[in-house]
Amino acid sequence: MWRTTGAAAPGQRIVGEPGTVRIAVDLLGGDQAPDVVVDGALRACQADPFLHLTLVGPADAADAVISALSPVDRQRITTAVTSSDTVRGAVRAVAEGAADALVSAGDTAVTVLAAARQLGRWPGVRRPPLAAVLPTLTGRLILLDVGSTVDPDGETLAVHARLGAAYASVAHHLTAPRVGLLTIGTETGKGDRLRRAVPALLTARPLPAGARYAGLVEGGDVVSGTAADVVVTDGFTGNVLLKGLETAYALTGPPTPDTEPPPRAALLLGVGGTVVVCHGAATGPDFAAGIGFAADLHRRASVAAIADLLRYSEVSHD
Amino acid sequence: MWRTTGAAAPGQRIVGEPGTVRIAVDLLGGDQAPDVVVDGALRACQADPFLHLTLVGPADAADAVISALSPVDRQRITTAVTSSDTVRGAVRAVAEGAADALVSAGDTAVTVLAAARQLGRWPGVRRPPLAAVLPTLTGRLILLDVGSTVDPDGETLAVHARLGAAYASVAHHLTAPRVGLLTIGTETGKGDRLRRAVPALLTARPLPAGARYAGLVEGGDVVSGTAADVVVTDGFTGNVLLKGLETAYALTGPPTPDTEPPPRAALLLGVGGTVVVCHGAATGPDFAAGIGFAADLHRRASVAAIADLLRYSEVSHD
């Protein structure tokens, strides 16, 4: 199905360097692929000397990339030719053990489907959500879903609340994450049909990692961070808010200008691997940040830690 | 049903001063009413010497307000006691001709219902939307609905597109407003069920005021303003995005810091009067800005001009 160029063939583990991470990158994902993908790959390798990247794409694009690389870069950036969708090829690299994580800015629905099929879903997760990290006035906040499930039911949001709570515990080292439900007024009964149904589900069930349901929150709370550490919403609203705030922060600066902004990339939660999704409009620096984010998640074994938290919680509470 | 204190009794027109505007203000609307309402009323009167305000509320609150006012302020700020909901009393003041416009930070659903019943709706407008004005990198943009209709159908969004186009023409002096549909990706077929159904409706029907349908836009386009002058969405998504962006701009400054920010208040479109809605969390300066906004709309006869545009369009195209 695919052939590789350079050093990192599928199934061939690169060993010997401490902290080495192998990331599969969807060469054709994004509005300005493959140029910004390659730009992002080069930037990511410059920032992290232990990174090995496999750019997954069709033969002609892969050959063009390799021929343009310097001999030094070819030591760490290889290509893999896939006959299927490039994101499927990148997921397969992770499924077959040729890569530790993948990054794609391709169609979200295709990425989620490929990841769910080839990497598997965790028990109880029918709809894996995309979780973004946003800067707030008080630190960082996890917003999910930001585009995977646009017409969820209440049950799906309740599952996403559990995933987000575990993610906040692992990624932001919170002992008791506060999980809020995004709506348009904090009085009981506010919001649309979906939002009126969900609070009962969130109140009734235990959350993992010592998390607690913090009630209804509004759009402004995603900026301040004062009401919740994890904000749960449908993928439509979450995507609109995320893109609005990211664009605003890009123009005006983040709420806390003196801290490093989180990557403009989201983690797909609930699948058996580390899958990072960039925006279709991602720039080279965005791809580099997404690749660095994926590498960091792998080095910290974050996805396994999140899975562990959820399993422990199920054992002890259900 | 209600009695008034001071100079402006219902039905009694205040005349003689050029540009005088009489605004009815819901004394109990908002999380911190009546204190911030009174604060906003005093600020508004300081900013505009031709403003007369009627604060509508229950007897005890109204009496407390009046007794605390200075003799000078009592010349321009009066109270009206209502036995029903305060927002209904404020709407009644407009319906009966005692006020030119009203401002409320009360429950949106109650305000919309009272306005629709007592002031009437324009032909074809089943669900009057709330339209907010946001600062952008290139000027100003109208976002609607921001909280009136949380579960709209496609037909409702198509009507809101017409209302928003006429509003942009009148308020922002645009000769050919661009109307965009808010979604989560600009490729055809992106978005949830509602969003997939609406583009056909917007393409098929003429918009008033020379406006044209500019296609699908994303959250970031509401910040930049480069893709559309009017952005149509459901009241849930619109409210979440509005509150997120307003909070971000309050912390980091607007996209164009050298221009006067628009008021954090929305105009209810499609009813037979000038109805301005503030957030529940409105501050005194927010109320003052909302009152000033209502006065400006009345002085320019904006609501009548919007209604005229829509009727002309119907006559010429339908």
Image (cartoon, coloured by chain):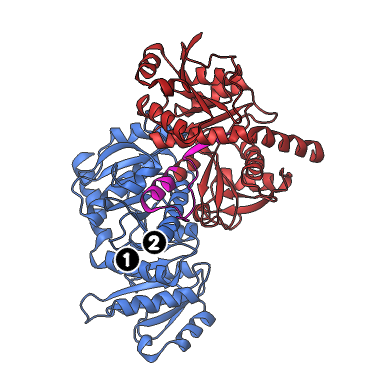
Chain colours: A blue, B red
Q: Nearer the viewer, residue A81 or A54?
A: A54
- Relative image position of residue B270 (x, y in whole percent): 63, 31
Tally of marks: 2
Q: Is residue A83 above or below residue B8?
A: below
Q: Which residue is mark 1?
A: A293
Q: Which residue is mark 2?
A: A265
Q: Nearer the viewer, residue B29 or A21?
A: B29
What amino acid is at disc 1? Phe
**Chain where mark 1 sits:** A
**Magenta extent:** B243-268
- The residue drawn where x is 28% and y is 64% is A297
What amino acid is at disc 2? Ala
- Relative image position of residue B50 (x, y in whole percent): 54, 30
**Chain where mark 2 sits:** A
Measure the C-alpha gap from mark 2 to mark 1.
8 Å
Tag 1's secondary structure?
helix
Which of the 4 image quadrants contains residue A71?
bottom left
